[in-house]
Image (tube, helix red, strand yellow):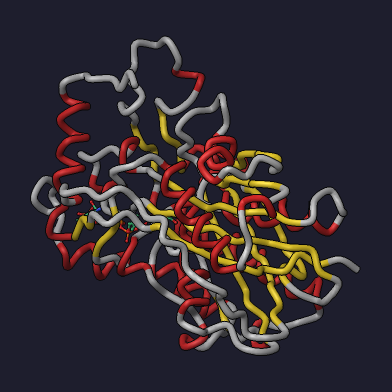
Amino acid sequence: MTYAAIKGWGKCLPPATLTNDDLATFLDTNDQWITTRTGMKERRISHVTVSELAYVACEQALASAGKTADDVDLIVFGSTTFDELCPNAASNVQRLLGAERAACMDVNTACTSGMYSLTTATAMIKSGVVRSALVIGAEVISPIMEWDNRDVAVLFGDGAAALYLEATEEKSGVLAESLGCFGESRDILAVQGWGMKYANKARQLGDAHWNFIGQEIFKKAVAGMAHGCEATLNKLNLTAQDMSLVVPHQANLRIIDALAKKLALPTEKVFVNIEKYGNMSAATVLVAFVEALEEGLVTDNSHVLLPAFGGGLTWSAHVLYFSKAPKSKGKSAVTLPATTLSGLELVQNLMRAKASGITNKT
Ligand code: UT7
């Protein structure tokens, strides 16, 4: 039987940081509320496009796997904030990498996009369509954020991560997953003004309104991820206690705690980095998983559970297997272009552009 082994990993976090105190300079909020209600302390704001973040993460993933762009058969780009819809974002990453042989596709399932992309690439490797793939979870949500709406503006950040997958006959990588969607509740997390429905309606792209019913989303997030985890574990005849590590979507520390309680998981097995990055939507689980790998938390003979949740309302839960603790083969020298702007300055620029009705024509 063919498996899709995770041979390399990388991340790219833009350097500009937006703290809770920065948010309190232009919103009726404070560090204490954000910290106690969400667990978030700061998040990153990107000065470049989502494709550029994804490209750097992919260079890191290839270096970590000891591979080059010529080795890549497929690029699956998971995001909700693609630079363009035509041509797709994966083709931009292909060009930046010089991965000329790679097939290129975009996947959008909101915050679970990185995980649905992992499923897509794994399935294509297992079925023999391709032998290798780059899987991307990346998001630059700041340009579409409703910065004067404290219900959502405090929750999200920008970032990217990538995995390099390769066919192997050894048991490895995704063993099973469950995917689903509460489509009847799709309106409780919806961004009005973002998509073709709004084209030529005298509305600039950054002029979005977030319909975000936090408490309802919270309940669906816990229910969806718990159901997904149980379904996946049942497929494998495993229990939550058999997991060495759980890397959940990081939308709210209280959601993570509620999920851990429901699954009876000890907190030391649950990876959390929400305080540094907030919710990076499609990038969240993959950035957290990459950081868990970097910290050596994925050990010999380990099962890792990755539950995720997002707009749609989509949910997913993957179980990965590693017979040996994965080791990185190197780092790439490729980095983002530098910026002198702070997170607060980048956000102020976005707010100014929106207020003056400037549309980006480049
Ligand atoms: O990845 C996508 C999935 N997203 C999620 O899963 C998010 C799920 N939802 C949540 O994480 C939480 O519902 C939130 C963090 C969004 C909100 O937390 P909450 O505990 O549900 O707060 P709430 O909406 O019930 O609001 C409580 C109070 C309200 O004031 P009153 O009515 O009690 O006077 C809000 O107006 O907190 C107020 N509030 C704020 N105060 C300061 C809401 N947002 C803020 C804020 N700063 N940013």
Q: Residue at x 91, y 68 (%)?
A: 1
Give the side of residue 237 with respect to residue 87, left or right.
right
Residue 105, quarter of the rendered image: top right
Q: How many marks?
A: 0
Tell me where residue 106 appears, x and y as whole percent.
Answer: 61, 39
Tell me where residue 131 appears, x and y as whole percent.
Answer: 79, 56
Tell me where residue 335 appears, x and y as whole percent.
Answer: 37, 55
313 or 107: nearer the viewer: 107
Residue 122, quarter of the rendered image: bottom right
Residue 185 can be seen in this image = no
Q: Residue at x 41, y 29 (%)?
A: 192
Residue 83 can be seen in this image = yes
Give the side of residue 212 with respect to residue 183, left or right.
left
Q: Residue furthest right?
A: 1
Q: Is residue 273 above or below residue 166?
A: below
Q: Residue at x 36, y 58 (%)?
A: 13
4 or 80: nearer the viewer: 4
Give the side of residue 231 with respect to residue 329, left or right.
right
218 or 278: nearer the viewer: 278
Q: Is residue 53 above or below residue 320?
A: above
Tell me where residue 57 appears, x and y as whole percent.
Answer: 48, 56
Q: Residue furthest left?
A: 25
Q: Residue at x 76, y 64 (%)?
A: 4
Q: Quadrant for ligand 1? A: bottom left
Q: Is residue 190 above or below residue 124?
A: above
